[in-house]
Amino acid sequence: MRTVHVIYVAILGSAILVATDVALDLTAGVGGWATIALSAVETALVIPWAVYVVRLDRQERAAPTGADRLRQGAVHALNIALVALCLGEKWLVLHEAVVHGATFYAASYRIYTVAAWVLVAIGLLGRGSRAGRFLFAMSEHPARLMSLSFGIAALLGALVLSLPQSLRHIGDANFVDALFTAVSAVCVTGLTVDNVAETYSGFGQVVILVLVQIGGLGIMVLSGAFTILAGRHLKIRTSAVLAEMVDVESLASLRRLVVRIVVFTGIIEAVGAAALYAGFLPYPQTDLDYAPGLDLSGAGGRLWAAVFHSISAFCNAGFSVFFDGMVPFARSWSVCLTLSVLIVLGGLGFPVLDELYRRAATRLRGDRPRRASLHARVVLLTTAVLLVAGTVAYGALEWGGSMDGLAWHDKLLASLFQSVTTRTAGFNTVSFGAMGASTLMLTCVLMFLGASPGSTGGGIKTTTLAVLFATLRAEFRSLPRPRLLDRTVPAATVRRALAVTFASVGIVSIAVFGLLLLEEGDAMDLIFEGVSAFGTVGLSTGITPSLSEAGRLLVTATMFVGRIGPLTLALAVAATARRPPYELPEERVSIG
């Protein structure tokens, strides 16, 4: 029998075994003799499967080099370890089901059964050399590699978040919910269908925070920084991916910027954690593990709460380990201002932070710095205008509404905090479910605009808004080309801004249409949910836990697209561009 036939027969046989296992689980329940026997068979088949995959992979390469053997060994080791992990967790669930006789372990059991089969199939179809060739082909295309890195991180994170060690109660395991949370963390969104404090253990919270940090900086940025710090040179393909991720034009300055990104992140998050720790001192509940009825419980330690919220704020993620989030801190100026500063710094973008650092260093040396770049000036000016306008708008719309009951100075603080957080971060000190439709519409606009390029936030970005404004003003004034802060905007930049905006409107429209089709409830709440997911903001009117599984998957996909960007996604799935051999004649089209 040909090798490919053996592979397909093995996959089909394992699929039948898994289907039988799941069918028995659904009919007879977890913990019966049949499920135990099938689990024993599945576990026993792992050893011959691993031997067959490794031997088959070696036959594909007659004389593999040392690097090939190392790569193949790493791929095999990872795949086998993941299969063993799934089966080990499956036996743990079986033990709990037998001891306690509970039926709510069925979801966890099915997760590990199906996950183990998928990994077995991947091991047969995508053996070491094939996986290596696939990854090499993906690395040739920066947009595809960027999308793949976020996708793999989210899937692995979902698997880990499904482990019993990540949950306070094993019965809470649900792969769709875990995938939702993992994608939300990697995409630094903050939307959750489960309350983090109530659902996830300390280990699960650590996993979420690691995913947030990976998503905020990017896997390629972290790996590139480690490579540089180890004294090695970046490959050309890696440099191209990093340049696209951090939005830097010159490869000459990439090395310096990558190192400073990691250094800036560490320093800012450490200072923010120290400031938050001081701000949490007047609140004893912040030092407690989750307890029903205590709004600020869930962290299990004040230091952990400070570190978690500092990283979550700088990465613009919006996750909180407190049961009621940041709402109890509506009157705490120290906590709200610290979070606001972290959010704004994370939303400015690393290229702008690097330029501000270099200008400050130049002034400290007594020299006069060069004029700030157009990009930095546009980002700072647009951010300031949006913050001030948002603060005034929230104060005017909600002064006697959702902010009723706060003192006037606390209302000013709440207005400022909501203006800061709505564009990317996802924290809130005022319930958005209690806000009026006009305020929710304003919030949707701010969430759609988002942060700045090269930052940890989403949206169409502040520079896109500025370029669109300059283009509109040039059209009204009959100027030949758009002007922005005494500079002419290149035509390619205008086309990119229009493409980003048009693609973003299309993606949001599809997401909202899908939610309106799949879910029941207030239309404004569903629109708010869709825009929040695309902008990777994480704010919600409270409907996220009530979404159906189809709605959750749709929101998950929207968060993923919003994080990597619509143009990056288009480049990832598009074929290689070819220059046409001819030009078509021009002809006018009436506009307006």
Image (cartoon, rainbow, N blue to C red):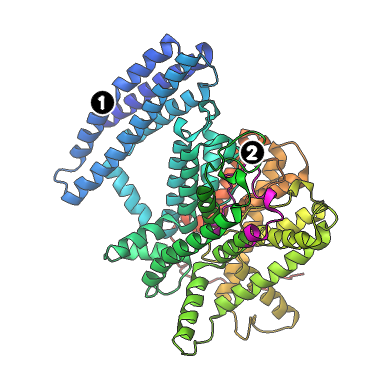
Q: Is residue 524 above or below residue 491?
A: above
Quarter of the picture containing the C terminus is bottom right
Q: Relative to residue 558, is residue 150 drawn left or right?
A: left
Badge 1 or badge 2: first in the primary sequence: 1
* Neighbour tally class for label 2: few under 14, some 14-19, many 20 plus, Cα within 10 Å: some
Residue 236 counted in the magenta span: no
Quadrant assignment for the N terminus: top left
Q: Amino acid at mark 1?
A: Ile
Residue receiving disc 1: 47
Q: Main secondary structure of the magenta part?
A: loop
Residue furthest to the top? 33
Give SS at disc 2. Answer: helix
Q: Relative to 125, is 218 on the left or the right? A: right
Q: Looking at this view, name the residue that lies furthest to the left.
A: 63
Q: Is residue 590 visible?
A: yes
Query: What kind of element bears circle 1?
Result: helix
Residue 442, horizontal then vertical, whole percent: 76, 59
Q: Position of residue 584 (x, y in %)?
A: 56, 71
Residue 347 on image: x %, y %:
57, 64
Residue 320 included in the magenta stretch of the image: yes
Identify the mark at residue 551; answer none if there is no mark.
2
Of residues 4 and 444, the one nearer the viewer is 444
Residues shaded magenta: 313-337
Q: Is residue 96 above or below residue 453?
A: above
Q: Examine the rendered structure and indicate whether residue 259 appears above or below residue 473.
A: above
